[in-house]
Image: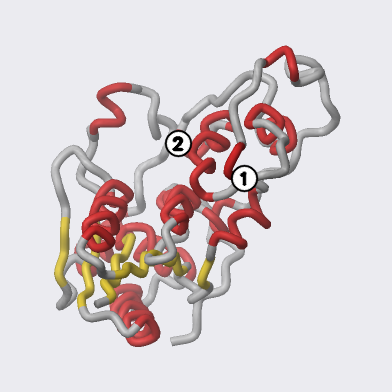
Amino acid sequence: MTHLLVDANGVACKLWWANANGAPERTRALVLRLAENARASTITLCWDAPAPTWRQEIFAAYKHGRRKKPDALVRAIAQCRALPFEHLEVARYEADDLLATLTRLALEHGDSAAVVSDDKDMLQLVEDPGCRVVTSAGKEIDEAGVMDRWGVPPMFLRALLGLMGDASDGLPGLPGVGWRRGVARALLGETGDPLTFRLVALADVPGLALPVGPAETPPPPEAWDSDSAEIAQPEPAWEAPEL
C-alpha cells in the first residue's frame, strides 16, 4: 500500500505564487494527479501548526525574518484546507515533522510513502527505498539525485545543511562555511564512501575561517524549498505544472 503525503502548505503557497487565480482548484487537481501516478491508496495533506512551534521554543530566531503572508494567500490556504482530503495538523509541529513521522509509520508497517514536497529537508527521507519524494512539478528525486545535487547521501543531508545554515529559516550555520558546499563536504570527510562520511577536525579543513574563493550561489529558493514561497515577494521564476 502506498500513502501519498503532501506538504500542503508548501504546495498551496507555490501554486498561489505561480498564479493566484484558482489556486485551491489547482491544488486539488495536482494532488489527485500525483496520487494517480503514485497509485496511492490514501491521501493526507499535512499542515504547519500556527507559531510558535517546538523549533521556536528552542531557537527564537527560527523563521523570525519572514514577512506576513498576503491576505489573498491566507484566504486561498483556508480554501485548500476545505478540500475533500484527509487533513492533519498537530499543535507545535510543522508539516515536515508530520510527513517524516507518517513516512516512518508507513515503512514500519511494510507500506511505502510518496512525499509531495519542494522542501530540501524532506530529501533525507529517500534514504529508505520505500519512500520517494516528488516535487510539485512531478519530478521524482531519489538517492542518486540527492548525491548529484548536494554531494552527500540523504542520511548526511541534515548535517550538511546544519553546517551551511539556511537563511530562509534564520539558521546561521557554521561561520566560514555558508553556501560553500565544498567546505561543508570537507567537514563531513572526503572519504569517497558515503557510508563512512564523518565529521572531521576543523583544523583539517584549510582556510575554513579564511576566504576560500567566492561563495557558491544558493539555489533559487523556489526550486528546492517550499517554505520560502510563503514570503511576500514578487512572483518567483517557477513554471506551474500542467494539470
Tell me which label, 1 or 2, sits earlier in the chain.
Answer: 2
Return the x and y of residue 186 as percentages of the image width and height.
Answer: 71, 31
Left/right placement of residue 169 relative to residue 4 reads: right
Residue found 59% across the figure and 26% down from its top: 199
**Residue 29 at x, y percent in the picture:** 33, 83
Q: Position of residue 179 (x, y in %)?
A: 67, 36
Q: Quadrant of residue 110?
A: bottom left
Residue 169: mark in rendering: 2
Nearer to us in this view, 93 or 10: 93
**Quarter of the image that includes the N terminus:** bottom left
Residue 72 visible in the current orientation:
no
Which color scheme is applied? secondary structure
Q: Residue furthest right?
A: 213
Q: Residue sitting at 57 percent across and 49 percent down?
A: 153
Q: Amino acid at mark 2?
A: Asp
Q: Nearer the viewer, residue 70 or 169?
A: 169
Residue at which label 1 appears: 194
